[in-house]
Amino acid sequence: MKQTVQFTLNGEVVTCIVDIRKSLLEMLREDFSLIGPKEGCAVGECGACSVLVDEEAIDSCIYLAVWVDGKEVTTIEGITKTDGSLADIQQAFIDAGAVQCGFCIPGMIISSSQFLKENPQPTRAEVRRALSGNMCRCTGYQKIIEAVELAASSK
Ligand code: FES
Ligand code: FES
């Protein structure tokens, strides 16, 4: 069974006819070719699929596509500035050397950007807590935490 959903995707109003069983992650990747959000675990554990829905970071692999009807969705592609240049948080990840294979990074940046909006001057413990739902198999997390702190300090 299919349903029409209309929502704002990275600042643009879009419509999609989607299978009601499809996840938001599947719709973003398959119907909108937004491949920034990644499928890691597919069960809501790793955070690789994180996107913002109405400015709240969610795991799009366990969030039904039809639930975004009337809502605002931001993916890693929408974090980039409108002129195509990197957002401060993206640049901070590069400057801090926080990216290895990169698979977890879209989710890390989505979670970080929302966190810094709510808490622009966080402590290290708060950064750790904020990213506790995002797994990384490469970096050991230290550089990622430093990247978020770098982004906060440059405000
Ligand atoms: S792929 Fe969604 S939480 Fe792991
Ligand atoms: S950089 Fe490879 S999983 Fe995080």
Image (spheres, grey):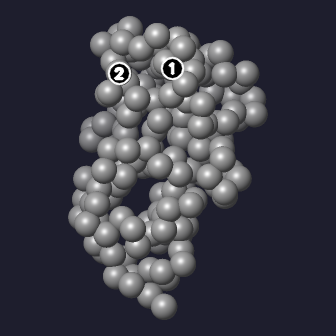
Image coordinates of residue 129 in percent, x first then y, are 55, 25
Neighbour tally class for label 1: few under 14, some 14-19, many 20 plus, Cα within 10 Å = many
Q: Is residue 16 above or below residue 92?
A: below
Name which quarter of the figure residue 15 lies in.
Answer: bottom left
Look at the picture and state if 63 lies above or below 84. Answer: below
Q: Is residue 93 left or right of residue 83?
A: right
User: Residue shown at 60%/45% (left/top)?
Assistant: 48
Q: Is residue 145 visible?
A: yes
Towards the viewer: 37 or 61: 61
The residue identified by callout 1 is 127
Please indicate whether residue 87 sits to the left or right of residue 149 in the image: left
SS state under label 2: loop
Residue flagged by tag 2: what amino acid is it? Asn
Mark 2: few/some/many CA within 10 Å (<14, 14-19, 20+): some
Q: Position of residue 111 (x, y in %)?
A: 47, 35
Q: Label 2 belongs to which residue?
A: 119
As shown in the figure, which amino acid type bears the numbered disc 1?
Val
Q: For residue 116, which quarter of the picture?
A: top left
Residue 36 visible (yes or no): no
Residue drawn at (46%, 10%), measured in percent from left and top?
A: 123
Give coordinates of residue 115: x percent, y percent.
40, 29
Instruction: Tell me: is circle 1 under 8 Å from ligand 2.
Output: no
Secondary element at tag 1? helix
Q: Quadrant of the C terminus?
A: top left
Sequence-wise, the earlier of marks 1 and 2 is 2
Instruction: Pick the residue in front: 94 or 57.
Output: 57
The residue at the point 49 percent across, 82 percent down is 19
